[in-house]
Image (cartoon, helix red, strand yellow):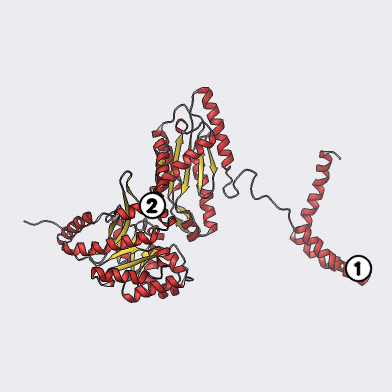
Amino acid sequence: MSDKSEQAAAGPRARIAALLRRPEMLAFIPALMLAAFWFGGEGALLAAALVLPVALALLRTEPARPTATAGRDHITGLPLRDTAVTALDEALAACRTDGRTTACLVLCIDEAELLLDRHGHAAWTQILRRTGERLQGTLREHDRVMRLDGARFAVTLGPVRQADLESLIQIAARLQSAAELPLSIDACTIYVRASVGFCLASRAPHGTGESLLRAAESALEEARQQGPGAIRAYSAELQRASIARDALATEAAAALESGQIVAYFQPQLSTDTGEVSGFEALARWLHPERGTLPPSDFIPVMQDAGLSGRLSEVMLFQSLAALRGWEKAGFQVPGVAVNFSTEDLRNPRLADRIKWELDRFELAPRRLTIEILESVVADTGDEVIVRNIATLARLGCGIDLDDFGTGHASIASIRRFDVHRLKIDRSFVTRVDSDPGQQRMVTAILSMAERLDLQTLAEGVETAGEHAMLAQLGCGHVQGFGIARPMPFDDAVAWLSRHKAKLAHPPRIGRRTG
């Protein structure tokens, strides 16, 4: 039978099968049963009762439909990595013949795991799909968008007459702005941040599409090291920096012992009085060659090397010493908060070590706050962690629940760990002065905290408007770049002096007389 004959025969069969799958055909089952009994007796009735429902069920089962086109992502419908490499190879080949150039950009949605955990898989799927659509809407006809792994997208530029660093920065910023537009999903406004790395064809280590794509990915990793929303270009210096970052593992232990790891302090203010209610201690590496390194550059390295316990010892010592130093300078800082990792909290001697350090500096336990992640409280299976936190709470230390709202800590867990204060995650604080949805979320957290007799602190406050709105909503304490960035001890002394003067002479509102 020819192909055309097969198609002709298949057409009527498909139409009949579709007809039999219609719901109204179920109404004929009683009539068919009666006909079987009338013409064939009880045996035919029994056979029809067994065979007919199964046959109709099989007919009603539609053939499986493919969930994705071959070579395309099943969520966004975009081409995959292989297509990106092929597109770049073709663009590079065209550029070699006519003198044009090309480039590759890689965009990544920041804090993807947090978004997935908070909003669920269905919402995350919508975020990916709509991000892909937005990126496509910003590009020219010959530019292409591909989905890489996780939350990453590749953008390949069609050959152009001229592409320099400035023009690529503008393209990267345009892609970033499109990805960061607020998303309305299930009556909830979701804000995302995106980082971008890119590489010009002239800067790629080798003249292949794979090399160009990998260079753009390296630039993206450098951007993500700098924090959410960064843009970085690939260069030979970046490649050397990546190699240098790998070498940090061998330097980490020596840095701890030589005093290169120091505590920077970020102030926390009371929204009622404006006075300093404490400082949070944050680690910085004063690297002799690379300058001041943020925690994201070296803490994972130290954790992998088993140095997190020693790091916490250094941070605790410097934090308690800072409290004494501020007192000698004439400032009464109520307390300092120190972060402790899960590995630290698993140390059976942690509570004894902290008590010994407090006695050494002759400080009351209430002057020290232990910061623990909400994810630690949510997982109550480790009895050593539970015992350590309970012992420190009984000792009189404050217990702050960091990044609150990003995990799954239950009220029972919060009570079990004797948490004193909730640190509202910065993702809820962003645009709280202008977004009613953010205001409702923060209000709900504050209402729960009030019912549980817990204090609250909002982190990540970046604007005066956010500060003012949080105070109006009833959040007790605030912290963030809008107040002050983390600073070394000496700078903190100077900042305290300026802040004290500002409180002593508040701005006058009203008309001058005389």
**Above-or-below relation of 382 to 82:** below
Which corner quadrant of the image does residue 452 belong to? bottom left
Q: Can see residue 212?
A: yes
Q: Secondary structure at mark 2?
A: helix
Frontmost of labels 1 and 2 is 2
How many C-alpha atoms fall within 10 Å of the one at disc 2: few (<14), some, or many (≥20)? many
**How many angstroms separate mark 1 from mark 2 (CA)?**
79 Å
Rendered residue at 77%/53% (across/down):
18
What's under tag 2, amino acid-wise?
A: Phe
What residue appears at the point 53 percent right and 53 percent down from the top-left corner? 126
Question: Which of the 4 image quadrants contains residue 31?
Answer: bottom right
Q: Quadrant of the N terminus?
A: top right
Spot occupied by residue 131 in the image (x, y as percentages of width and height):
50, 47
Q: In the current view of this chain or complex, which residue is farthest to the right?
A: 40
Q: Quadrant of the C terminus?
A: bottom left
Picture coordinates of residue 201 (x, y %)?
47, 32
**Where is mark 1, residue-wise?**
44
> Residue under circle 2?
298
- Give residue 472's position: percent from left, percent from top: 30, 64
Please give the count of numbered marks on the rendered protein.
2
Relative side of 40 to 78, left or right = right
Horizontal and vertical percent for residue 122? 55, 57
Q: Is residue 335 left or right of residue 410?
A: left
Q: Is residue 225 above or below residue 99?
A: below
